[in-house]
Image (cartoon, helix red, strand yellow):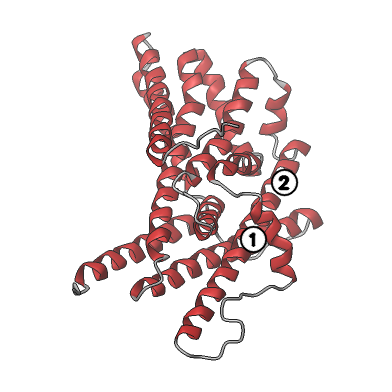
Amino acid sequence: MIRSARPTPAASTLGITLTIAVLHLFGWGLPVVAILLGKDVLLVLGLAVTAYLLGARHAFDADHIAAIDNATRTLSGRGARTSAVGFWFALGHSTVVVGTVGLLAAGVHFLVTAIEDDSSPIRQAAGLWGVSISVLFVLAFGMVNLHSLVRLVRRRRAAAGADVGTAGGGPTGPLFRLFRPIANLVDRPGRMYPLGLLFGLGFDTAATIGLFITTGAASFQVSWALALALPLLFTAGMCLFDTLDGAFMARLYGWAAQHTGRTFRYNVVVTSLSVAAAVLVSMAGFSEILSQATSSNLALPLDTTYVGFIVVGVFAVVALVAAVTRVREPITV
């Protein structure tokens, strides 16, 4: 019996790079075609740049960052290669945008009113669905990482001679037992694709598609090439930055997991940050679910607009400090 070989890290990286390059090639090539066909340069470039920046901005949404970072930490603890986590998540998320715009271009016009109307059942259901999925999986990853964090601390204290009971254990309460099977559904980076697809059915993506409907209608009057370019540019921007985030976190977690000297402390720091981000996003999402389900203003006063940028910035600072301290460490023979 012949087993199919898994792609090597180099082949996987090459495939991801080529995919992102092709998205950029077609995404930016189609506006060039529109310009060559005599369309207004400022209009074409303005819409193209807006779509690309919208995708890049979407990659830094708090739920994206929390899902990618916590999934990367969880899979790293299992010894899996995790540099492609962000790529597969973004690709699944983008499939909803590209697929819906494709249906609209094919003449499925009943979606236009349903998506553009904030009070439509589809928009309401999409909002509730998207938030529920993000809370469920982000909290599941967060609980698994909390278990890993407590286990790290207990092992360290046991190594130092402290009496901590079961040194290698972690919290195994009802919440951990409830959420661990959910987190286990993502057992390799490729499983982030269906998760990204589920995230993509949410309110934010519906709002993005609504924007593409508006701009797409104008674009079809300007050029078919520009109309096709908009969702591709959105996908290219989001895939690039989600992939970079996932690869960066994979490298950071991989280094921090060495469990020696300062690296142990950095492991605790980055894992704690991941858990904190998961809890914050879950709290904000859960309060939003209660508000929508009860038609009341129960949402917590948590503005997560810039949480994704803040989390990435903090991790970047941690990585910089880690790199500097490693360089300054004396070489022992």
Q: Residue at x 74, y 43 (%)?
A: 124
| Amino acid under disc 2 | Trp
> Relative to 257, is 288 on the left or the right?
right
Q: Residue at x 40, y 34 (%)?
A: 11
Residue 51 position, x and y percent, is 46, 32
Query: Looking at the image, how many numbered discs can be counted on the residues?
Result: 2
Residue 170 position, x and y percent, is 61, 75
> Relative to 131, is 327 on the left or the right?
left
Q: Residue at x 37, y 38 (%)?
A: 10
> Relative to 6, is 314 on the left or the right?
left
Q: Residue at x 55, y 54 (%)?
A: 71
Quadrant of the image occupied by residue 123? top right
C-alpha span from label 1 to label 2: 15 Å
Residue 291 position, x and y percent, is 74, 58
Residue with the mark numbered 2 = 129
**Of callouts 1 and 2, the N-terminal one:** 2
Q: Is residue 229 above or below residue 301?
A: above
Q: Is residue 144 among what the camera can see?
A: yes
- Secondary structure under tag 1 reads helix
Q: Is residue 275 above or below residue 154?
A: above
| Amino acid under disc 1 | Leu
In the foreground, 18 or 242: 18
Q: Residue furthest right?
A: 294
In the foreground, 308 or 326: 326
Residue with the mark numbered 1 = 139
